[in-house]
Image: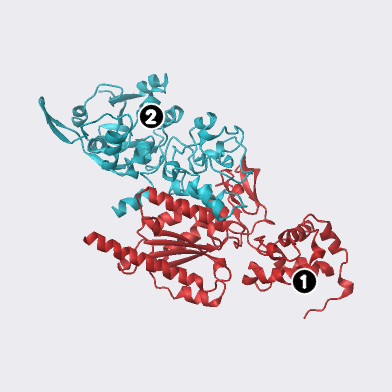
Amino acid sequence: MATVLSNQLDPTFKDEVLAEPGGEHLLRCYSCGTCMATCLVRRYNEEFNPRRVLRMVMLGMREQVFRNPTVWLCSACDACYPRCPQGIHISELMQAIKNIGMREGYEPPGPVAEVDDTACSGCGMCVMACPYEALYLKDKEVEGTMHRVSHVDRYRCMSCGVCAAVCPLSAISVEGYSNEDVLVRMQSGGWLSDRQAFSPDEPRVLVFHCNWCTRVESDWAALSEFPPNVRIVPIACSGRVDPQFILLALSEGVDGVLVVGCDPGECHYKQGNYIAQGKMHLFERSLSQMGLDPSRVRFAQTGTDDRGRLPHLIEQMVDDVKARALVGAVASEV
Amino acid sequence: MSDKLKLALYWAASCGGCEIAVIELGEKLLDLMEAAEIVFWPAGTDFKYADVEAMADGYIDMCLFNGAIRTAENEHIAKLLRRKSKVMVAFGSCAHEGCIPALANLTDREGVFTRAYLETPSTDNPECTLPQMHCVVPEGELDLPEFYDTVKTLAQTVKVDYFVPGCPPVAEQIWNVLQAVISGNLPEPGSVVGAGQKTVCEECERIKGEHKVKRFVRPHEVIADPERCFLEQGIICAGPVTRAGCGRPCLHAQMPCRGCYGPPDGVYDQGAKLLGIVMSLIDGEADPEEVQRLVSEIVDPVGTFYRFSLADSLLQTVKSKRD
C-alpha cells in the first residue's frame, strides 16, 4: 500500500477538473465501484481502475494521476456510463482529466496510428471513419510541394485500426496490425496458397477475432489447440478487417471465413463491431448477388462475460463448413 | 511502305465510347497521322479481318484494343491481333477490367438470353426465338460466334503490355499515351498508363471528412450539396478507390465518381475495398438495427461497388473457381 502524504497533495486539482468541460460531475462519485466491475479495459489490464482514478483526483493526487499510464487507457466505450448509479459520464470525465494532462505536457503511453505522408492522398476516409475523431486533414509540405494529408492526434488515437482498414493506399499503419502484418499472419507457412496440404475432410477456415474477445488464459490455450486447417488471426478490433482480406482468402479456396467481434454495446472501440457487422452483412449480400454461398463467411459476436465462447464459435464454424462440404459432395454425386 | 508507327485499333464487347474518345482527339488526329499510320480500325477505316491475317507476325507496332471478351469472335481477334502486334494495349475499362459488359457475370448466357430476348418489357418475341450458333435459312447457312457464359478482360485472354483505364479514357490522357509511344517513352510493360498514381480524391476540391453517414441514398434521390464530399452525404462515390487522371468530369457534373479508372496500385479488389470504406463511415450512434437498415439502403452492392471492375475482381475469381 502506497503512502499518501498530505503535503504532496494538490487540493486545487479537483476544482480544475470540475471546471474542465466534461469534468462537472466528479463529486457525484461515491466510489461504489460499478464502473470498475463493468470496465472493459480493466478486464484486459488489471491496473486500470476508473473508481481509483476518480478518487485520486478528488484527493488531489495530481502527479500520480498523470504519471500513471492507465489514465490514458480509457477508450470511451461507455460500458460503465449506463450502469453508473450516479449517472456520471465517466469517459467524459476521463477526457477532461486527459485534457488537463495534455496541457501540462504529459503524453499518452500507447502506440498510435501512423500516416505515411508520401502515400496519403488526403481522401479523408480515415477522418470520417475514426471512432475517436483522432484524425484530421492538414496542409503539409510533402517532398517539396504542399499536400493535404491526414494527421493523427496522438492524444485521441486509441490504435483500433479502423483507419488502416479504410485507407485505400495503405498509407496508415497501426503497430502490429498493418496490412502487411495481417497478410503475413494469414499467409505464413503457405497456409493460403498451399491448398493441397489439407485433405477434403479438413476444410480450411480463417478466423479473425478481436483481441477483446479473449479474456482468460483458457481461451488462448484453446485457440492454440486448433488443427492447422484452422488459421486464427487476432486483430485489434473487428472493425479492422478489410473485406479484401476475406476475398483474398476465398479466392485461394479457403472454405470459410469467420470474423468475431464484441457484442452490441460492448465494443472496446465504441463502434468497431457495428462497422464489422455492416461490412460483413453487405459482403454476404454481394456474395449472394454473385450466386455464391453467403454462408462461407460469418460474423459472430461474443460478450465480455462469455468467457470460453470464442473457441466454441470457431468449432461451430468448422462443423458447419464440414457439413456443407458433405451436402455439396452428395449433391454432386446425384 | 512508310516507316511510320503502325497502329491498329479494335473494338470487342464495348459500347463504342472508346472509339469516340479517339475521335475526340480532334485536330490532334492530324498530328497523329504525321507520326503514325493506321493499319486496322474497323470503326474508322475500311479494313477486313483478312487484311490482318495477311500481315506478318509483329507487323503492327501497337494495337489499342478496346472492349471485353464476350464472344468467340472477340477471343479470336484478340489472339490474332496479339500475334500481329509488338505492343498490345488494353484500351479503356472494358478491355482493362470488364466494365459494364462484365456485370452480366452476375448471371450466365442463359440468364442474359432469357432477359434480353424474352423478358424485357419492350421485347416482342412470340416464338421465343433465341440466338443460335448455327442456323439454316432459305438463302443458306448462317453462323454466329459463340456467346460465352463469362465476360473476360483482355489480359485474361492474351498477354497485355499496357493498360489505359477509363470509360472511356479521356482524350487528353490518350494523347499523353500516344506521345509517349511516338517518343519511345513508355514505362515498364504491365503498367497502367494514361492515368495518375493516387486516387480521384487527391484532386477533388470538395470539402471532405466532416460528418458520419446517417443514411445512404442514390444520386437521383437527393439534390447533393455541390461543395461537400459525396460520401459524407451518403451518396456512394468510388473516388477513394479509383485511380486519378480522368480530370473528374463526373464530379464536375455533380455526379459521384463511378470508379471507371480502376483501382490504384495496392488495392487488389476495388469493390471490396469500397464496400469496407463505405460501411466504416456509418454513424457512431448506430445500433444493430440501424446498421442493418444502412446495409439494406445499398440497393445493388455488386453493381455499385464493382460497376467497372467485376471481371478483373477477386469476387469473379471466387466464382470462376467454384465453377
Mark 2 neighbour density, 10 Å: few (under 14) some (14–19) many (20 or more): some
Q: Secondary structure at mark 1?
A: loop
Above/below status of A178 relative to B187:
below
Q: Is residue B1 left or right of residue A165?
A: left
Q: Which chain is red?
A: A
- Residue A126: percent from the left, percent from the top? 58, 49
| Chain for colour cyan | B
Q: Nearer the viewer, residue A45 or A271?
A: A271
Amino acid at the residue labelled 2:
Ile
* Residue B19 in the image, given as x and y percentages of width and height: 35, 27
Element class at badge 2: helix
Residue A169 appears anywhere in the view:
no
What is the chain letter for disc 1? A
Quadrant in the picture for the N terminus of chain A: bottom right
Image: B61 above or below A131: above
Q: CA distance from mark 2 to mark 1?
A: 79 Å
Label 2 and label 1 in one chain: no
Q: Residues within 10 Å of mark 1 (few under 14, many from 20)?
A: few
Q: Quadrant of residue A155?
A: bottom right
Which is more toward the observer, A290 or B37? Answer: A290
The residue under label 1 is A31
Q: Nearer the viewer, mark 2 or mark 1?
A: 1
| Percent coordinates x, y for residue B184 in the rendering | 39, 33
Q: Tell me the residue at 38%/32% (across/down).
A: B181
Q: Chain of mark 2?
A: B
Residue most extreme to the bottom? A1
